[in-house]
Image (cartoon, rainbow, N blue to C red):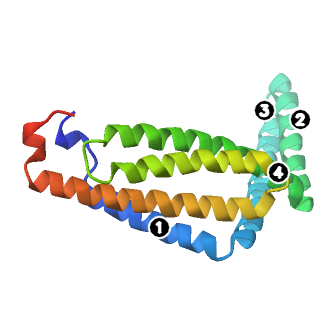
Amino acid sequence: MNAKALPGNKMLSFVGVVLVLLGLLLLISPAAVGAAVVKLVALVLVVTGVAQLVQGLQAGRAHSVISTVLGLAVAGLGVLVWLNPALGSGFLTALLMIFFAVHGLYKLSASIRYRNFAGWTWMLLSGLLSLVFVYLLWKQWPLSGAWAVGVLVGLDLLLTGLAMIVLSRALKKARSGGYFDTIQL
């Protein structure tokens, strides 16, 4: 891989700063953020269900029955989550575990890709920490709930952002020093 195939250090740094700021915002009030996310998911489910229901009522006969049933089910699930946030919070926590597992593995592979640059260990540590988050959530699931969404996502964003800033500086230094002229990634 050549230097042009790697992301620009300015974009990497910008995204890193945005992630750090978002992470800090989430950490300020994790329970409120978690509760808001559950309500937002409930609202999306209701809107999606109603749209599916309308589509089902306008469709042909066989498709109409399936779409109508799916629309009612999805909208009903949205209402259920809205009325019982603990249910929605448990479901979101399960999705969060999947997200952290996949995101952690991605960051581990990215750290290996950048291992020739100073700061690659920050991405490695961020990936490992994401996998630790999976373990922590699993041990307390489904009780971890709303606080976990805010705290763990906030920490993940903060650490990923910091890792991206460190990597962007290493890329800038490598590009200015002619590093890419001498090696092939």
* For marks 3 and 2 on the same chain, the one whose residue lies earlier in the sequence: 3
Amino acid at circle 3? Ala
Q: Provide the residue designation for mark 1.
A: 20
Helix or strand or loop: what does disc 1 sit on?
A: helix
Specify the farthest residue to the top: 62
Q: Where is residue 89, by image quadrant?
A: bottom right
Q: Provide the residue designation for mark 2.
A: 69
Q: Which mark is residue 109?
A: none
**Distance of label 1 from label 4 (alpha carbons):** 26 Å
* For marks 4 and 3 on the same chain, the one whose residue lies earlier in the sequence: 3
Q: Circles 1 and 2: CB distance less than 8 Å?
A: no
Q: Name the residue rendered at 31%, 43% in the picture.
A: 114
* For marks 2 and 4 on the same chain, the one whose residue lies earlier in the sequence: 2
**In the rendered image, the vertical position of residue 147 relative to residue 138, given as above or below:** below
Q: Position of residue 115 (x, y in %)?
A: 30, 42
Are there few (<14), some (14-19), or many (20+) residues within 10 Å of tag 3? some
**Distance of label 4 from label 3 (alpha carbons):** 35 Å
Tell me, yes or no, if residue 39 can be seen here: no
Of labels 1 and 2, the one closer to you: 1
Of labels 1 and 3, the one closer to you: 1
* For marks 1 and 4 on the same chain, the one whose residue lies earlier in the sequence: 1
**Distance of label 1 from label 3 (alpha carbons):** 46 Å
Q: Provide the residue designation for mark 3.
A: 59
Helix or strand or loop: what does disc 2 sit on?
A: helix
Q: Name the residue rendered at 89%, 35% in the picture.
A: 69
Tell me, yes or no, if residue 30 can be seen here: yes
Amino acid at circle 1? Val
* For marks 1 and 2 on the same chain, the one whose residue lies earlier in the sequence: 1
Q: Name the residue rendered at 50%, 64% in the picture.
A: 158
Q: Provide the residue designation for mark 4.
A: 90
